[in-house]
Image (tube, grey):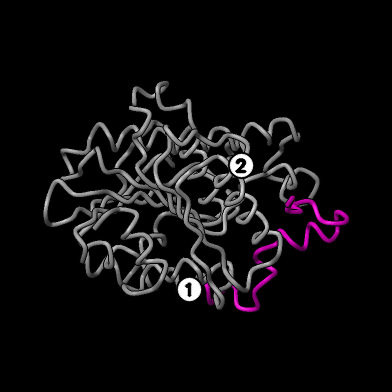
Amino acid sequence: MKIDLMFPDLASRAVQYNARASVADFDACMANYARLARQAKAEVAGIYDLPYGMGKAERLDVFPACAQPAPLFVFIHGGYWHSQSKEDACGMAGVLHQHGIALATVEYTLLPEATLAEAVREVRSAIAWLYRHAAQYGIDPQRIHVGGSSAGGHLVGMLFAPDWQQDYGLPADVIKGVLALSGLYDIRPLCDIYVNDWLRLYPDQAARLSPLLCLPTAAQAGKLVLSVGGKETDGFRHQTLAYHQAASAQGLEVTLVEDSHNNHFSLLDELAVADSPLSLALLRMIGV
């Protein structure tokens, strides 16, 4: 069954892909991200603003685990590629720390200062940096997992893609698992609506940067866990369902965590709840 990502016309498509307009309390959602991040930083010691590249935005924070070497979860924030930051993206640090998992949160150059291709290159560089500096921060380089929400879901989808790892001197299986929340996996539908004000892509360029169109083989891939909020628009729901369908058809090990009560922004908060279905799925993916 083909899942509609384009919708009947441009006006309805713009509504379907407008996450901010889909919630009545956007500012409250952002305030909760900040609150959870402050709480996590008070509970778990972090090492901040480690440079993984030459650009001013190419920085990451590491929250080491007590028992080392530890598995690592790398989280990439959302914000439609042009807003938000890593500073408010560590709300899950406490839950991970309880289970002996290190956390890294990654910043990248926002659009339109950067291109989307550059943002993809930066997060791949961050993985290479973490792999090479793993021992310094008590990280097991053989147990790197990644996650992201919204635009971050797209970026971790591009980390799940094949054939880039060798360009960074990394093993093909450097990523052992991916958690993608409310992601954008085929970005061609965004080229005709307001999002292209900062994406600035033609459809053929967007195709090359769409995770749905560059899936790995089953032999190359780690585990994939997907979720989308039950209160999200059909645009974001269809994106997740289409990616799940394509990954399943490829024979990949993919899990869809059902949700009934979260919107596009509150879904991420589930990772700060130790026994939420999303946290439990993440822990199973990491293997703890």
Q: Nearer the viewer, residue 43 or 208?
A: 208
Q: Which residue is drawn at 50% across and 69% down?
A: 267
Q: Nearer the viewer, residue 242 or 155?
A: 242
Is 2 on the left-hand or right-hand side of 106?
Answer: right
Q: Which residue is drawn at 46% across and 38% down?
A: 159
Quadrant assignment, res 175: top left
The quadrant of the rendering that contains the C terminus is bottom left
- The amino acid marked with disc number 2 is Leu
From the top left corner, tell me how far across and down residue 38 is, in percent: 33, 69
Q: Mark 1 points at which residue?
A: 31
Specify which label sits upstream in the sequence, 1 or 2.
1
Q: Which residue is drawn at 60% across and 72% down?
A: 230
Q: Name the residue under label 2.
A: 212
Q: Give the range drawn in magenta.
A: 1-29
From the top left corner, tell me how far across and down residue 89 is, in percent: 41, 60
Question: Magenta includes 5?
Answer: yes
Tell me if I can see residue 280 in this picture. Answer: yes
- The amino acid marked with disc number 1 is Ala
Tell me if I can see residue 55 in this picture. Answer: no
Is 186 on the left-hand or right-hand side of 89?
Answer: right
Q: Residue at x 69, y 66 (%)?
A: 233
Q: Considering the numbered disc 1 on the image, is that residue within a helix, a strand or a loop?
A: helix
